[in-house]
Amino acid sequence: MLRLKYSILSFLALFVLVMPQASMAENKHNEIVEAPQTMIVKFYADWCGSCKVMQPELDKFLENTKDKSTLYVHFDLTDEQTRQKSAYLAHSLGLEDIYKEHAAKTGFALLVDNASKTVEGKITKEMSSADMMKMLES
């Protein structure tokens, strides 16, 4: 009988300890996330020299956009498999038209208004991270 009481009390104690953690995890995953204002859409390929030149400044720019309402999207056009995945991602984000128009080229990124899905600017290898930020903020 004592063993049964101990088992029940142990179970209840464990239940009390685990339940708050389970509900916190549930709350974390059920948070409402606001849609970003701007998408930064990069057209990339492993073999693209311009992509490699642009990347260091783009990385600095992306670091400075963490507190902005942005979403970084990376379309990899290296081979057929990555193109298919990128096309699916474009479709999922409502960027099919932009993807179709620009997927034949690499080495740049586009600033896209998320609400209207219109291109607001083009980031190239010649730009500094400060130039990129000015474009985003204009």
Image (cartoon, rainbow, N blue to C red):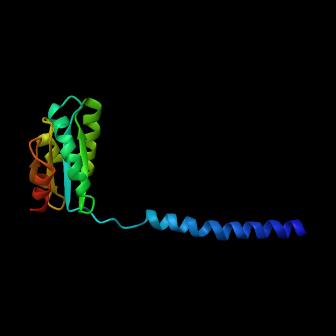
Residue 23 in percent (x, y) is at 54, 68
Q: Is residue 138 above or below residue 108?
A: below
Residue ID at (83%, 68%): 6
Residue 87 in percent (x, y) is at 24, 41
Residue 137 in percent (x, y) is at 12, 62
- Whether residue 38 is visible here, answered yes or no, is yes
- Whether residue 94 is visible here, answered yes or no, is no
Closer to the camera, 71 or 63? 63
Residue 84 lies in what quarter of the image? Answer: top left
Q: How many numbered callouts?
A: 0
Q: Is residue 103 above or below residue 115?
A: above
Residue ID at (15%, 38%): 107
Q: Residue furthest right?
A: 1
Residue 55 lies in what quarter of the image? Answer: top left
Q: Is residue 118 above or below residue 53?
A: below
Q: Is residue 40 above or below residue 1?
A: above
The quadrant of the picture occupied by the N terminus is bottom right
Residue ID at (29%, 66%): 34
Residue ID at (10%, 53%): 131
Q: Is residue 105 left or right of residue 90?
A: left
Closer to the camera, 64 or 12? 64
Closer to the camera, 134 or 71? 134
Residue 42 in percent (x, y) is at 19, 44
The quadrant of the picture occupied by the C terminus is bottom left
